[in-house]
Amino acid sequence: MNQPMTSVSLRNAPDVPTVSYTERNQQYWMRNLFVCVFGSFTTLVSLSMLLPFLPLYVKQLGVTSQADVIQWSGVAFGATFLGTALTAPLWGRLADRYGRKPMLIRAAVGMAVVMSLIGIAHNVYELVGLRLVAGLVGGYASASTVMVGTQAPRERAGWALGLLSTGSLAGALVGPLIGGLLPGWIGIRGTFFAGGAVIAVAALLTIFVVRENFQPAIDTKRKAARTTAEANAPRTRYAVIGALLATAMMVLLANMSIEPIITVYVGSLGVAPDHLARVAGVVMACSAFGSMFTAARLGALADRVGGWNVIVGCLVVTGLVMIPQAFVEQWWQLAALRALMGMSLAGLLPAIAKLARHAVDESRTGQMLGYLQSAQFSGQVLGPVIGGEIAVHLGMHAVFFATGSLLIVCAGFARWARER
């Protein structure tokens, strides 16, 4: 006689196919990774290449006072990062609902259009507004993190995210160098058109090369398997997520805190005024240059030894390397320490993204990684502000002490989260 199905068997019966989003896209993740690296590189080049000539463009748009030029240049540069910080969680949530590829296309096409429009701005208000729109509708690197973070196999996620981070860092490093050359050849406005054209190439590659097997009926409902302990300990999960977001913000905050004072600090080390801008640019670039060498390697290390171990170790090393920067006597000593700091910082973002991916249900990974991107860009916005305030009230050396101490405290917080 047939026995009736018990409530236990009903609970255990799967209501969705067992093939996950990651498994369905396993054949595409590598090709998608390389397109995302190229796209992240080109968009970061286009966003950062205006640094050398931004004050000149602000003057062209009718701002005459030197103080106003400096103020509007800072506002225009930071507007993009503010816009990205505001909308990254929204785009991550839409990626969970409609797929990762549409978000990449949206970011690439939006950036290509807005970058070209910046080249025909009539006044500084339009410049700031378009830079803000670039952050609101753009964010190719953020969308790439969502795609790569959800498609790469668990055992390769750290390496993949590290390689993606390398592309972004390289773009941020190369951008100012290109921005120092192109305006002399094709003019400032022509440089923006060239940047838009390069991003358009990335958009075409995204449309025709990137592949995704996204099934809304499955991927918007599928829940990652939870243990009984996980289901009964939501506060622990929130604490871990909070630690990841706080650490992500601290990474960019620490790297950017010295930006407002770097030129003045380098000048205090005896650098001649004629060479001050060039030397300061080299010092600023050293952290990104160091990160390029170690991002993929430390991401792979996180795959082997665990993300939390890499996070705690990198935070401690970064904090310890930050403090001696207050005692340097030559600019090259500062550059070397900034390079070492960049090498240790590089291991943080891939490891954090890897852990964030698995901290929530599969149907919410895009939203989670969006919040992670928002935390990073918030740190990028807050870092120069906090660093400038500390320098004004406590002196330039205090910036290094305060930032290094915060990183070590953050390492203790991360170690507590690891144990939880």
Image (cartoon, rainbow, N blue to C red):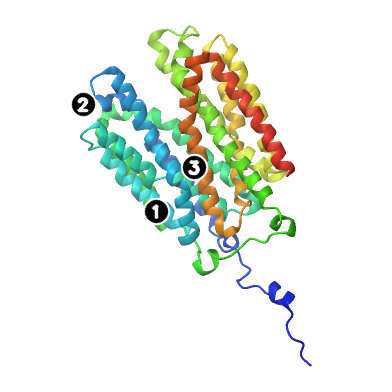
Vertical arrangement, residue 232 with respect to residue 257, above or below? below
Can residue 39 be seen at all in this image of the molecule? no
Q: Amino acid at mark 1?
A: Ile
Q: Amino acid at mark 2?
A: Gly
The mark found on residue 62 in the picture is 2
Vertical arrangement, residue 84 with respect to residue 314, above or below? below
Q: Which residue is mark 1?
A: 105
Q: Which residue is mark 3?
A: 374
CA distance separating discs 1 and 3: 20 Å
Looking at the picture, tell me which residue is in the foreground, 252 or 36.
252
Front position among marks 2 and 1? 2
The mark found on residue 354 in the picture is none
- Indicate the secondary structure of the residue bearing disc 1: helix
Where is residue 233? Give x, y as percent: 70, 53
Residue drawn at (53%, 32%) of the image: 252
Where is residue 232? Give x, y as percent: 71, 56
Give the residue at the far right of this rendering.
1
CA distance separating discs 2 and 3: 33 Å
Q: Amino acid at mark 3?
A: Ser
Q: Quadrant of the C terminus?
A: top right
Q: Quadrant of the N terminus?
A: bottom right
Label 1 near label 2: C-beta < 8 Å?
Answer: no
Residue drawn at (51%, 64%) of the image: 213
- Indicate the secondary structure of the residue bearing disc 2: loop
Looking at the picture, tell me which residue is in the foreground, 186 or 217.
217
Looking at the picture, tell me which residue is in the foreground, 24 or 394.
394
- Indicate the secondary structure of the residue bearing disc 3: helix
Mark 2 or mark 3, which has the lower sequence index? 2
Mark 2: few/some/many CA within 10 Å (<14, 14-19, 20+): few
